[in-house]
Amino acid sequence: MDREPAKSSSLPLSAKLIAIAAGAVLITVTTTVPYLTLLNAFFFSGVFIAGMVAIYYAVISCQVPLAYHDSFLLGSFTGLAGGMLSETVSYLLIVMTGYRPGTESMKLLLDWARGMAAGRPELAEQLRMLTEMEAIAIAPVQLTAADLLTGIVLAAVFYAPVAGLGGMFMVLRLKRQAKKVK
C-alpha cells in the first residue's frame, strides 16, 4: 500500500452517517434475509461487501479521497452499527415471531454435507454430530436482554474489523482505478 500523508478526512459528517447507515442496513439484510445469510458463511462476505459499499458511497458522493486508515475506521463504524442493528432485528424476530435468521441457510448447508457423506461409513460420526447440531439450532429458545447485549458485543467484535477491511479494499480499488484513468 502506498504511503499516505497524515491528514484528517475532509468527508462531511452527514456523508459519514449516511454511509454508515447504508452499510448497517446492508449488514442487517445479509444476516437476516433467508439464503442471503449464506454470503456470511464465507468469511463474512456480506459484512465485507457492506464495508465496501459504505466507503464507495462516501468517496463517490463527496468526491473526497480517503486514506486507508480513514476507510478502515469508517468501515469499522459501519460494522459496529450493522452488528448492533442486525442483532436487534434478529432478537426482535426471534422474540416476536419465533423466526431464527439463518436457519434456512444452515439447513441447506447441512443437507449438502449429508449428500456428500451419503454412502461413506467413515463419516457416520460427523453426520451424527451434524444431526445433533441441527436439533439444537432449531429448538425453541427464550432470549433475555443479556442475550441481546451479548449478541451485540460479539457481532461488533467480528463485524467491525471485517467491514473495516472491506472499506480499505474499496479504497485500494478506487485508487488503482484512478491511476488507470490518469
Image (cartoon, helix red, strand yellow):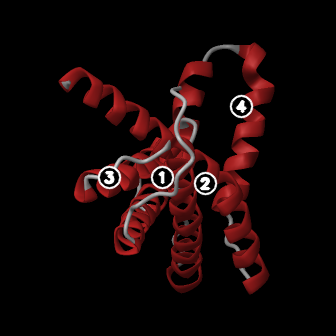
SS at badge 2: helix
SS at badge 4: helix
For disc 2, the marked residue is 159
Whole-Å distance between the Cαs marked 1 and 4? 18 Å
For disc 3, the marked residue is 64
- Front residue (pair 174, 114): 174
Q: Of tags 4 and 2, which is closer to the observer?
A: 2
Instruction: State if disc 4 and disc 1 touch (CB < 8 Å).
Output: no
Q: Which residue is at 69% across, 77% downward?
A: 148
- Front residue (pair 92, 70): 70
Residue 116 visible to an observer of this rendering: yes
On the image, the x and y values in percent for residue 12 come to 37, 69
For disc 4, the marked residue is 127
Specify the amino acid type for callout 1: Glu
Q: Of tags 1 and 4, which is closer to the observer?
A: 1
Instruction: State if disc 2 and disc 3 touch (CB < 8 Å).
Output: no
Asked where in the image residue 62 lies, by quadrant, the reply is bottom left
